[in-house]
Image: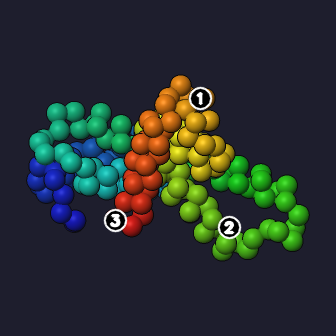
Amino acid sequence: MPSSSFASRAEVQSVYQAHHQWLRGVLQRKLGNASDAADLAHDTFERLIRANVREPLNEPRAYLRTIATRLLIGRARRAALEAAYAETLALQPVAVEPSVEARALILEALAEVCELLDALPMTSRRIFLMAQIDGLSYAEIGQQLGLTSNAVQKSLARALVHCYTAVYG
């Protein structure tokens, strides 16, 4: 088990033994699939281990349900992203269609970018996308969002530092 800030290894084991079956049952009812439920339960406990929990959990089931819900939301976002990508591909001529391997790599990269951008505050994310995707100037972004050019520039700089740090450490 990787080192973590969790109160103790024994507590992780205790929470796992007491609540794993319950969590799998909840997830199986939501997903309708035992295999996916087992995977998501595993991912939930993995997140719990990596969390910065320093004291015993007062409500472990609520905490586990929150983690699992966030993972389900992430899964739904990824599925929507994959569907949008597949729809875009369907509109392209056959000669432009990438190989299965290239598609998998592209989807993985898109999911990582989405996760990276989701970690930004909403305003910073909008500024980043308006500058990088739409190609708008600081003044144009500021006008649309009701911010000064200086505020836009600072927010974009923080977003770029966040992205650089996430990618390159």
- Give the mark nearest the N terminus, 2 or 1: 2
Q: Which of 62 and 149 is in front in this view?
A: 149
Q: What element carries label 1?
A: helix
> What x and y, as percent, mark residue 150?
45, 37
Residue 167's quadrant in the figure?
Answer: bottom left
Disc 1: which residue: 143
Q: What residue type is labelled 3?
A: Gly
Disc 2: which residue: 103
Residue 140 sits above or below residue 81 on the image: above
Q: Is residue 73 at least partly visible in the picture?
A: no
- Give the mark nearest the N terminus, 2 or 3: 2
Q: What element carries label 2?
A: helix
Q: Which amino acid does label 2 sit on?
A: Arg
Residue 152 sits above or below residue 168 on the image: above
Total numbered labels placed on residues in the image: 3
Closer mark to the observer between disc 1 and disc 3: 1
Residue located at (31% from left, 41% from top):
64
Residue located at (53% from left, 45% from top):
128
Residue 124 sits above or below residue 36 on the image: above
Residue located at (31% from left, 56% from top):
46
Q: Check the picture and name the quadrant holding the N terminus.
A: bottom left
Q: What residue type is labelled 1?
A: Gln
Q: Distance between the residues labelled 1 and 3?
A: 33 Å
Closer mark to the observer between disc 2 and disc 1: 1
Disc 3: which residue: 169
